[in-house]
Amino acid sequence: MAKQDTVDKVCGIVKKQLAVAEDTVVSGETKFADLGADSLDTVEIVMGLEEAFSITVDESSAQEIRTVEDAASLIDKLVTDKDS
């Protein structure tokens, strides 16, 4: 399970990238598709995450991301790997 602060940061990035209403609830379980995201939106989300966390997400990993939790878990792993 991803760190809560990572999940919170991903939620903020997803809301910004998808321009969802401010009162829209986005949590770890939120699926990007449920917010109206298509594959191009997902690519843009991943690019935003790469920039925000100073990481690089390979294409196969990016294709596995469906939810905020998926993204946050991957980010935590990549950040840990990068720092070790």
Image: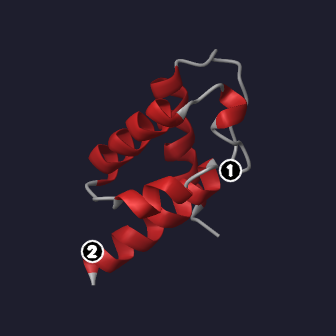
Residue 49 drawn at (x, y percent): 38, 46
- Other residues around mark 1 within 10 Å, as few (<14) / some (14–19) / many (≥20): many
Q: Can you give x and y, in whole percent of width and height, for residue 7 in the image?
A: 57, 52
Say which quarter of the image contains residue 51: top left
Q: How many numbered markers are drawn?
A: 2
Q: Which mark is residue 82?
A: 2
Secondary structure beneath dot 1 equals loop
Task: Give percent across and percent down for residue 10.
Answer: 51, 45
The 10 Å Cα crowd at callout 2, few under 14, some 14 to 19, many 20 or more, is few
Asked whether, in this view, residue 45 is left or right of residue 73, the answer is left
Quadrant location of the C terminus in the rendered image: bottom left
> Residue at image x 74%, y 49%?
29
Residue pictured at 45% horizontal, 63% vertical: 61
Give the numbered dot on residue 28. 1
Residue 29 vs 35, above or below: the answer is below
As measured in the structure, the alpha-carbon distance from the residue carrying label 2 to the one carrying label 1 is: 23 Å
